[in-house]
Image (tube, rainbow, N blue to C red):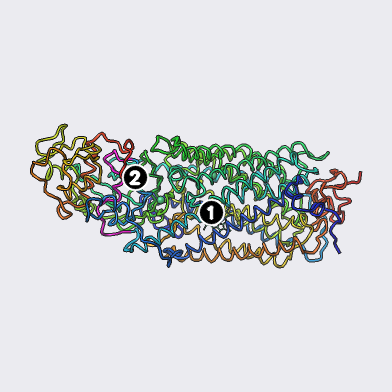
Amino acid sequence: MELSPKTWFMPVGASSIAGEVDWLFYFITWMSVAFFVIVTACTVYFLFKYKRKPGEKPGLTIPLHHNTVLEIVWTVIPTILVFFIFIWGFRSFMGLFVIPAGAEEVRVQAAQWSWTFRHNVGGSGNESKSNNLHVPAGRPIKLHLSSSDVLHSLFIPDFRVKMDLVPNRTTSLWFTALEEGEYDLYCTEYCGEKHSRMLARVYVMPEEEYKQWVWDNAKVATGKEIYDTKCSACHSLEAGNSEMAPTWHNLYGRTETLSDGTTIEVLDDYIWESIRYPHLKIVDGFEARARMAPFPKQSLSDEEVENIIGFMKGLSDYKADEASEDPKP
Amino acid sequence: MNKLPEKHFINSSRGIKSWLLTMDHKRIAILYMIMVMSAFYVAGIFALIVRLELAKPGALFFKDTVIEKQVDKSGAQKGSGAAGSTVAADEAGTGPEPAGAEGAGGDETGVAVPAAAEQTAPDNQYKPIDPGMSGDDKARMAKSQVFYNKMFTLHGVIMVFLFIIPSVPAILGNFLLPLMIGARDVAFPRLNLASWYLYLIGAAFSVFAILHGTVDTGWTFYAPYSTQTGGNATVIMITMGVFILGFSSIFTGLNFAVTIHKMRAPGIGWFDMPLFVWGIYATALVQILATPVIGITMVLLVLERWLGIGIFDPALGGDPVLFQHFFWFYSHPAVYIMILPGFAIINELVTVHSRRHIFGYKAIAFSSVAIAMLGFMVWGHHMFVSGQSEFSSMVFSFITVFIGIPSGIKIFNWVATLYKGSIAWTTPMLYAASFLILFTIGGLTGVHLGALGTNVHLHDTYFVVAHFHYVMVGGTVIAFLGGLHHWWPKIFGRMYNELWAKIACGLVFFGFNMTFFTQFYLGSQGMPRRYHDYSGMLKTNLFESLHGFSSWGAMVLGLGLLIIAIYLIHAAFKGEPAGDNPWGGLSLEWATTSPPPTENFLVDPEYTHGPYDYDRVLPEDMSSETAGLRKV
Ligand code: HEM
Ligand SMILES: [Cu+2]
Ligand SMILES: [Cu+2]
């Protein structure tokens, strides 16, 4: 049952489990057609056959109140059928949940209203991020699913897989894509205004091409990498400011006193400003030091700034929900 | 020839007060009819709006509205002081939405910054979200999306809570139940009136929510979206509305259960009742036992929103899947509150109009009760992909596939009832036949959804939309329309125009199939439900032709329903007097005048033959003096 049955109602089956799901689907469908034809044919036949002619006076009808044999037959046959369907359905369901060893892992983060897919880049600790899902053909892929706000659900019709993404929980899903190509990926759990725009594509590519893609796509440096190459000369990660600059240890969320005597809470806004226009606000005590050079967009992209901020958060005990002045609207 | 009786429940007293303070179950049924049918047509208009939007890809509504340019909020915030830094969000294509930012704001401690989704490296190959849209277009799109989400939510909420749950029990059940068991009224007439007032209050809360703002949660109110979206007042209002409507439903159920136990006329045993009564009885049991759960759930939701008690919201340590358990623990039994009364009606239509004794009385009676009980054990089949344990999914799937059996048995019994009947092609009979065909499709596609492997693919797609409309519309609404046509002459003593009735029945049948059969295919192909737009997908062209066809079907269906409203209302006031027993029915409601007198029977009804004894009692015997009724 590897191959998909010839498909006319379902979309193409492009994953390893699609075949079994489709067989079950078509089995139930044909069984339904059979029952439907029986019920409809009898109903319509009786309607015509026993139609009361206009003006005809009805007489007494047959005293047929029930028929035990008939009733047993039409109870037992469907019961056997649905039991069989249940077993079959359960088998294919377990196929969806028993994840083969050695599956390539992709972390999926859903948020209103977009998808982020993260791949590990060959042991470097780096990750490759994308709004679309890229996978190699012929190899099991495991998706780790999580949501950062409300419920979402990841659905790839051509692979016959679907799983909800629940905030504060991880769920998972696996498949092996059989054929190279481009497939739709939808959000199927209603998540608000742009639910219908929470779309992505799945690109199934040959193994080699996939490896290359992951590598190329990882170009955006991680916060740690940027720190190592561009910031570590002056900023330390240990407690206590260095001579040159404030430490990043517990920086995020800290309240700093500026050279003009005012104070400021170090959150996204201030960090953005300090990277792009470092001279505008200087922390008290560092006025006399060498000025930090500004990093315009050309030398540090927006993504990279965000990555730095993410990195800083990791170094800080600050919890967003404890702060009353969360900068977000 | 036929004449209305001189005095009957409609003209027995006059004035608006005599209606609003009435304790007569028949008048309360009419009060319910006015409200519930209005709800049906209003929700139908919302459905047509939804279908219109889906007729073509892209946003259809608000295309040319001029909207103030949206302020780029998250951009403004990040850029403050850092002028010139445009935010990645725009490149990723997601419009900066306050709700999104808020949702993301809750969880900023981890390294996996949630907002990161917006800051992902721009993926140049494919940008599904509003590709290349100007700010104005985006704003229009947003408005259109919000409007759409509101429309399908209102359609679902009104259809479920204001229309279909009260429809058959509160209108036909109220009117017929006492008549069928030879009682003068229900057990608690005051409670009956109170349930109508509760319905009014619940409806008022809902209308307030509709006028006041946006309720866009879908009729399922899934947390945590429902604890975040819209204004507090709006969502609290509509959940309170559902809470109050629940009590209205409990009152009705309680009243009916007691009435059936205690008020049967002498000589009428449990198995001498028309099966309509059995159906209403099973429904009443579910109403009493299940509805409190939705009440509790709604209260928890309100408390969650209002006081942040953290039962469902994961940001507060709650569990959103728990909400789904609570919700479906009511709402699955509730689908039997919706369909059992439909079954109940069909029993009467197939027997009276084919003049045949019902086939398998006890099988039908017990299968109703079996469905009602089993219905409490399958709620988890709505949650196979919610992250619940695979073991629970297995158990729920097992029970689910078997719950189809009693429904199947009923279908076979009804078809067998037609065998060797004397079938009159009346409008009610045509509805009964439509029911047999349409509900069979609805029931069988339930097997696709009950089996685990196929459920995963079909869940939350248009396949589900098609399935439940085949059950709810093809089943309950068709049966309800059949019932209205069957008992309209009893209720108002007047007949509608049979030709128009048959034309409308045909339009409803074909329009319905055009609208919803298409959706089985749409769903199998993967089209998700609750989607405002399907542009920018690989299958947009296929979806466009299917959705387009479906929308045309909805117009035909809408036309049919409109015609029905016109001729039925006309008939209620101006129709030909119908006579007491136009169809020659044997159950007790036909043994009194049409419309019945306020006290239901002018003489005490006495049980002389069963409701389905068409093999013993000739239609000639049928008149109010002799049928099932002896002068005392
Ligand atoms: C008059 C004919 C009807 C038409 C044309 C119609 C059409 C629709 C459409 C287009 C949707 C949106 C599907 C989606 O986006 O997921 C929908 C949803 C729905 N309909 Fe109907 N419908 C009709 C009657 C009914 C009736 C009688 C009921 C009674 C139970 C009903 C219950 C629902 C429910 C519960 C939803 C789901 C709403 C949600 O997703 O929150 N509909 N209908
Ligand atoms: Cu979504
Ligand atoms: Cu259910």
Specify whether residue A179 is in view. yes
Q: Are marks 1 and 2 in contact (CB under 8 Å)?
A: no
Residue B63: x %, y % from top left: 43, 66
- Label 2 resides on the chain identified as B
Tell which of A186 and B195 is nearer to you: B195
Q: Which residue is mark 2?
A: B104
Predominant SS of the magenta segment: loop
What amino acid type should be assigned to the residue bearing mark 1?
Leu
Location of residue A56 with respect to B240 vertically, above or below: below
Mark 1 element type: helix
Q: Quadrant of residue A146?
A: top left
Give the residues in magenta.
B107-127
Label 1 or label 2, whichever comes before in sequence order: 2
Q: Label 1, label 2: how many angstroms apart (C-alpha)? A: 29 Å
- Label 1 resides on the chain identified as B
Specify whether residue B393 is in view. no
Residue A182: x %, y % from top left: 32, 58
Mark 2 element type: helix
Query: A51 left or right of A293?
Result: right
Q: Which residue is mark 1?
A: B211
What amino acid type should be assigned to the residue bearing mark 2?
Ala
Residue B194: x %, y % from top left: 69, 42
